[in-house]
Image (spheres, rainbow, N blue to C red):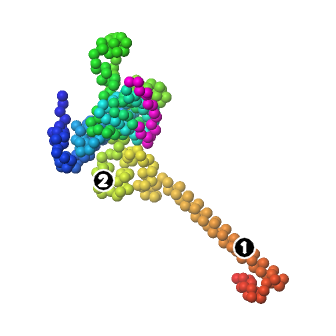
Amino acid sequence: MTTSPNSELVAKLLTAANQNERINDLKDTDFVFDFVNSTHTAQGADGFITVVNPSSFPALLAGNGAIGVGVIGPCGLNTPHVHPRGSEIQINVGGGVLMAQFVQENNARVVKNLLPPGSATVFPKGAIHFQQNLGCDPVTFIASFDFVDAGVSQVALNLFKLDKDILSATFNDIGVEFLDKLVVPPNIALGAQSCFDRCKINRKKFVFNGTFADFFESTKHHKALASASPYQAMLGSGSDPNTMSGMFRKSFIRSQETSFSENPLRSTVIGLSATLVAVILLALFVVIKGKRSQRKAKKAEYMEAVSANMVDAPYRDAVVFVEKA
């Protein structure tokens, strides 16, 4: 059995007399977990996932929960598994649609849902559940747990560790020979063949080689936060848009960070500005012309009234004034 390098700190936190003592036992940097450079990432043929617990992130013991982040590649499958000590809330951060299902226990119905980006679902403690990426692009998800050490048990991976004769009997005498040939892939595994067919990907040859660094901002952007403005801190420097968060499109970043003369939207902005000026000038011309027409109409009306002796004397000066104007 391997010992965690944080074992002593974890023991100290577990035996602390109170919360203040726990916080004093931790450095400021202990409260930050770096997923990009984590050595606790489980890598499979079609994705990877990191779930933190007190062993990898002792500061969790100052709170009452845990978190995991994963990327499921095209048509990838987060195989059926159980969290024996905690419930999970999972949100699809982006990339495509996830199919999620869970079953709680014997005689319970199967709960089935589709999770588009920006939606979340809950997996109750102890429920067998999975997520299948239905799309041809990677999907990033975040999972939170209501216990610092929720645990995880991949159903098939651990089931087939049991004695083969017992498993053979469980599966109605399927045969030990069959079980000997059975290979359970590590998580995250290649998903349904129908998805690979739809995406025109050769399932037998496909291997997803992405890392967290491909889906999160580079650490060099984090170092610049202290000197950057709040707006720049949100977007990063903009000098290397390929490392920016997928939440911002490259064209948007370039339009905010480059000079106006180099901005790809320059011609569009100039054209819209010219059109707006033309519309304003046309509106002013119409208004001025309309007022002149009204003045001429009133003048003609008053002159006609004067000639017909229809205007009283006190108003004739006004008519003359209008005529002079």
Quadrant of the rendering where the N terminus is positioned: top left
Is residue 84 magenta-colored?
no
- State the image coordinates of residue 49 (x, y, percent, origin top left): 33, 35
Q: At label 1, which amino acid type do we have?
A: Ser
What residue lies at 30% left-to-right and 28% top-to-bottom? 153
Quadrant of the rendering where the C terminus is positioned: bottom right
Secondary structure, mark 1, is helix
Q: At label 2, which amino acid type do we have?
A: Ala
Q: Is residue 94 above or below residue 306?
A: above
Left or right of residue 258, residue 220 in this image: left
Q: What's the CA distance linking mark 1 and mark 2? A: 64 Å
Which stretch appears magenta? 106-121
- State the image coordinates of residue 83 (x, y, percent, origin top left): 32, 32
What residue lies at 19% left-to-right and 49% top-to-bottom? 20
Residue 311, picture quadrant: bottom right
* Sequence order check, earlier mark of 1 and 2: 2
Secondary structure, mark 2, is loop
- State the image coordinates of residue 187 (x, y, percent, origin top left): 34, 29
Q: Residue furthest right?
A: 308
Q: Is residue 289 above or below residue 60?
A: below
- State the image coordinates of residue 19 (x, y, percent, origin top left): 21, 47
Q: Is residue 316 above or below residue 149?
A: below
Q: Is residue 140 visible?
A: no
- Name the residue nearer the viewer: 67 or 199: 67
Left or right of residue 99, residue 147 in this image: left
- Name the residue nearer the viewer: 207 or 301: 301
Residue 224: give its label.
2
Q: Which residue is mark 1?
A: 293
Residue 282, picture quadrant: bottom right
Question: How many numbered discs sit on the rendered protein?
Answer: 2
What residue lies at 63% left-to-right and 66% top-to-bottom? 283
Q: Is residue 19 visible?
A: yes
